[in-house]
Amino acid sequence: MTPGLHFDPIRLPPQCDALRAQVRAFLAEEIAAGTFDPHRPGGAELYNRAFSRRVGAKGWIGMTWPKRYGGHERSHLERYVVTEEFRAANAPAHLHFVADRQSGPILLKYAAEHVKKDILPRICRGELCFCIGMSEPGSGSDLFAAKTKATKVDGGWRVNGSKVWTTSAHVADYMLALFRTSPRTEDNRRHGLTQFLVDMKTPGVIVNPVYQMSGTRGFNEVVFDDAFVPDDHVLGEIDGAWKQATSELAYERSGPERFLDTFQVLPALIRALGPQPDVRGAEGLGRLVAQLHALRRMSLSVAGMLQAGKEPVVEGSIVKDLGTIWEQKLPARARELAAFLEPEAANRATLDEQLAFATVIAPKLTIQGGTTEILRGIIARGLGLR
Amino acid sequence: MHTEAKWIVPDESDHMVAETARRILTDLADPQTINRAGNGAWKEPLWRALTAAGLPLAWVPAALGGSGADAADGFAIVDVAGRFALPAPLAETLAAGWLLARAGLAAPATPMTLAPTRAHDRIAVGADGRLNGRAQRVPFARDAQHIAVLADGGGQPMIALAARADCRLSEGRNLAGDPADDVAFPAVKPLRIAPAPRDFTQSSLMLLGAAVRSVQIAGALEAILALSVAYANTRVAFERPIGKFQAVQQNLARLAGEVAAALAVAGSAADAIARADAWDDGVFLEAAAAKVRTAEAATEAAAIAHQVFGAIGITREHVLHRFTLRVLSWRDDFGNESYWAAELGRRVAGRGADEFWPLIASR
């Protein structure tokens, strides 16, 4: 028996139109001021603290969180509009985005009250950057194989070990990390890991760069050398992190960032093809447009279900699986469609630049935040196959 | 070997109309039963029950002889027809009634189809008021008593009702064996005729048809997924249900992704048409994209499902082909995915790069 897949055709409520207009006006001002260039991939400073503060001042970080923690108590659909407009415009949201999407919601749920009161308002103001300490040299997709160890000491924990592939660690103020506090048990291999909040300025936390093939410093290795984490920075149940990991996943997996990472290729392709493309260009472009529309409608549908209090775990995983494969293939498809354009054609150079960037970052898209293989395992479980 | 098939509307469906359709089709048009019967004895009682429930003319206002359900209810019936891979002109009669209602024409209480269903076919109204032209591969034409026609009346689109008996049919079949007949209109005198509304063109009709076929494809694809998962959980090979093998799981997860995309994009297009007050770029994007994406999904999903079933799935005895061959056939009606992709691509290119994201974000 298969549970039905649900993708209700939700429409954004009217207040989203006004918000979208405000976001576009703000981004247009930032573009005019030279903060970033929507047509230049990877050109702008990705971690722009001043820009993130201006975004925070607009009320666009922590939008759905309670006002008593600096949030704005707006809907997930309104947050969706902000997220997709930032992505479509190529705006540099790296500094605050991880905190906004996942670290903040985890803190809201599991952090001590005084920690929430201290940190969440600063996230909302665009002052804090978070990184995620999950993967280790011997533990990637197999999250529960993590070995970095937190040992109980007076008043807190001593951490030793290392995390790797940690995006943003070199600028992050905090990490949400998974450390081993007990060995796994005979009957539960997921037991024994605890979630911690780590101040990146803690003595004994050492960040080493790991450069990516794209030339960017996306990755880091983070070494913990007897680093001290106080008791009140434990998040949730000791040894029971495995129970906490799932509920926010649908948000993480189904947002517009899961299919818009190479989006800039598409407007560049439209410019290069011109207003009257030949049938090959038109058909190829039309398919990409149809596929993008389908993904966005799926993604928005999941956002609507989440807003309604449902838990579309399988649907969310499907959005990430299809979305990341689509954004990964996009530069390859655009390259084929541009193959017979005149080399000197107007806008060809911009397209080539976008293609080069997107092609080099494409492989990571189906790895970060849950590989294709892991996602399909989750989908198969949802179908009742395992 | 006969798996517990669940080609049903989700239980929490809030469409009473869909529930009625589901009940009738379960009783009178069960795909497995039709497959075993191998004759058309089921057709007459089915149509009587559908008509008694007012389903075929759901999109026709009561004043014009229909049951006056709203647009969403009509699409819910189409969805159920898809889930049952129904080999009868229910979706066609719905669409024909819808077309007639555009021009305020009353609909007869008979099985109908409509023409044209191919984007490049043209039917004209001559100075004598008669219909001339040809429509290729009109679904279920020979089973229909009437054909709703969109014709060109010298620059003014006209909507007409023709008796099938007045037309010349050249019989054909689609991949699934359902009638797909070429219909010639040799100076056919229409039974009724009236002008189409101002902004209604052949493109509008193709968009509606594309949305209808998309919804049918999506419904049938969900049935294919349910069949495939049920089979993978019961068929044992190498001493395990094949669904326990990761390679099979990954394939079924891909199948689920294609089904999900089809459901989302088709449901969205139906909703868009139900809400639309004009045939604007937004509706065009929704319906065209739905046909492109559901057709792509049909291609992928049929291949994966047959791979899961192995040899049994390609036998006539097994019910799978009733679904896979229909979704593959439905790709071609009312503009195939290549046609709509090119149309959509031209429209997007014509609007220009700066107007691209605003179009996507407007839906």
Image (cartoon, rainbow, N blue to C red):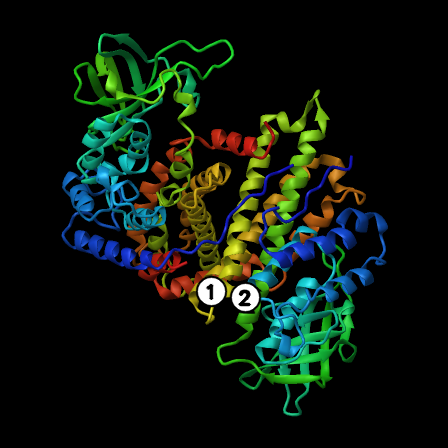
Q: Can residue A172 be spotted in the picture? A: yes
Up/down of B225 relative to A374, above or below? below
Q: Are marks 2 and 1 in contact (CB under 8 Å)?
A: yes
Which residue position is annotated with label 2?
A: B207
Residue ID at (52%, 65%): B274
**Location of residue A311 in the rendering, given as x and y in whole percent from the top left corner:** 46, 38
Which amino acid, mark 2?
Leu
Residue ID at (84%, 58%): B40
Which amino acid, mark 1?
Val
What chain is tagged by disc 2? B
Between A176 and B221, the one nearer to me in the picture? A176
Is residue A1 left or right of A142 when viewed as pictured?
right
- The quadrant holding residue A127 is top left
- Precedes in sequence: disc 2 or disc 1: 2
Is residue A36 left or right of B55 when viewed as pictured?
left
Q: Can residue B335 be spotted in the picture? A: no
- The quadrant holding residue B311 is top right
What chain is tagged by disc 1? B
**Location of residue A269 in the rendering, given as x and y in whole percent from the top left corner:** 36, 54
**Location of residue A82 in the rendering, given as x and y in whole percent from the top left corner:** 29, 49
CA–CA distance in space, label 2 to label 1? 8 Å
Which residue position is annotated with label 1?
A: B283
Q: Secondary structure at mark 1?
A: helix
Up/down of A319 relative to B176, above or below? above
Q: Secondary structure at mark 2?
A: helix
Up/down of B102 relative to B217, above or below? below
